[in-house]
Amino acid sequence: MRACDKNWTLTGLVDTQSSSLVATRHIVRWFDEHASHPHVIVGPARSSEAGAVATVASAQNVPVISYWATAPELSSSPRFPNFMRTIPCDRGSAFAVCSFWATEMHFSAGAVVYAHDAYGDGYNSVLRHLCV
């Protein structure tokens, strides 16, 4: 594997503490306090923070690239025009789960246990849609 041949200056590294509120406060403060904005924001990891940061960043026309956020709602270009990710959204894995349940396991009913956040709500919604 080759090293990245780009010379980047990394500034404004923050810990979102897995909180969309904390992430939003950091990004708003960054835009308020700095005359020059970053060319790109890498992260945050979690879907809920990624959506919040992408909303604020798109107002400044700054792209956000997440390496872990997989919530299907983040695929909405009208809502998140500058959001990108390096990992597929959860539709594919939800489809695979539904197919496995139906064809391999012959299940006709199931329950979804999930966290009430962007990731959990999105995955639950896609599973319910695809498995019915």
Image (cartoon, helix red, strand yellow):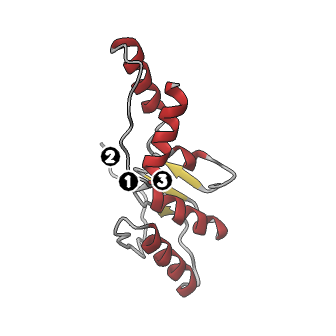
The answer to whether residue 14 is above or below residue 6 is below
Q: Which residue is mark 3?
A: 118
The residue depicted at 50 percent of the width and 72 percent of the height is 24
Horizontal placement of 110 versus 75: left or right? left
The answer to whether residue 90 is above or below residue 18 is above
User: x%, y% of residue 132?
Assistant: 53, 25
Please tell me the numbered disc located at residue 4.
Answer: 1
User: x%, y% of residue 17?
Assistant: 34, 69
The residue depicted at 49 percent of the width and 55 percent of the height is 65
Q: Nearer the viewer, residue 100 or 34?
A: 100
The residue depicted at 43 percent of the width and 47 percent of the height is 120
- Mark 2 residue type: Arg
Please tell me the numbered disc located at residue 2.
Answer: 2
Q: Give the farthest residue toward the bottom.
A: 33
Q: Nearer the viewer, residue 112 or 87?
A: 112
- Mark 1 residue type: Cys
Which is nearer the N-term, disc 3 or disc 1?
1
* Secondary structure beneath label 2: loop
State how far apart marks 3 and 1 are (Cα). Answer: 32 Å
Horizontal placement of 35 versus 49: left or right? right
Q: Quadrant of the N terminus?
A: top left
Horizontal placement of 75 versus 107: left or right? right
Crowding around mark 1 (Cα neighbors within 10 Å: few <14, some 14 to 19, many 20+) is few
User: x%, y% of residue 64?
Assistant: 53, 59
Residue 7's quadrant in the figure? bottom left
State how far apart marks 2 and 1 are (Cα). Answer: 7 Å
Which is nearer the N-term, disc 3 or disc 2?
2
Looking at the rendered image, the disc whose residue lies closer to the viewer, 3 or 1, is 3
Cβ–Cβ below 8 Å for labels 2 and 1? yes
The answer to whether residue 96 is above or below residue 125 is above
Looking at the rendered image, the disc whose residue lies closer to the viewer, 3 or 2, is 3
